[in-house]
């Protein structure tokens, strides 16, 4: 029986919250991705809810102040 070696991917992740700049427009997204890559990161976890508003399109949720399209 041949053994197979599974390698686990290791995340070097960053958290992007909705209280600061980072993903509120395309320029911020580009800079955040570049900064994370420069720091050796390979994942970004995005907070999509901010004080009851959302940073994603949904007709049943309020749009967050400062989100794209404001």
Image (tube, rainbow, N blue to C red):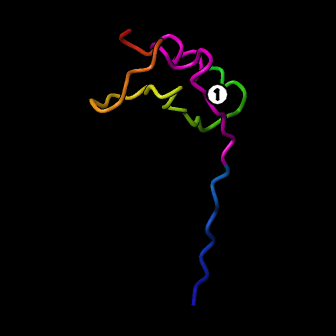
Name the image quarter holding residue 68: top left
Percent of width and height locating residue 6? 61, 68
Percent of width and height locating residue 48? 49, 31
Q: Is residue 55 left or right of residue 40?
A: left
Furthest-right residue in view? 39
Name the image quarter holding residue 44: top right
Mark 1 is surrounded, within 10 Å at the Cα level, by few (under 14), some (14 to 19) or many (20 or more) other residues, namely few
| In magenta segment, residue 25 | yes
Q: Is residue 1 above or below residue 34?
A: below
> Looking at this view, is 63 or 48 the one in front?
63
Furthest-bottom residue in view? 1
> Looking at this view, is 35 or 51 the one in front?
51
Q: Is residue 24 left or right of residue 62?
A: right
Name the image quarter holding residue 67: top left
Q: Helix, strand, or loop for circle 1? A: helix
Percent of width and height locating residue 59? 27, 29
Q: Is residue 44 above or below residue 34?
A: below
Quadrant, the N terminus: bottom right
Magenta residues span: 11-32
Residue at 61% from the left image edge and 81% from the top image edge: 3
Q: How many numbered dots are placed on residues in this image?
A: 1
> Looking at this view, is 69 or 35 the one in front?
69
Residue at 46% from the left image edge and 14% from the top image edge: 65
> Looking at this view, is 46 or 55 the one in front?
55
């Amino acid at each position: 029986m041949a053994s197979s070696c599974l390698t686990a991917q290791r995340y070097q992740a960053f958290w992007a919250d909705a209280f600061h700049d980072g993903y509120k427009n395309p320029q911020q997204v580009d800079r955040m991705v570049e900064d994370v890559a420069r720091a050796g990161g390979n994942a970004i976890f995005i907070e999509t809810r901010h004080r009851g508003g959302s940073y994603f399109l949904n007709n049943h949720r309020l749009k967050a102040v400062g989100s794209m399209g404001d």
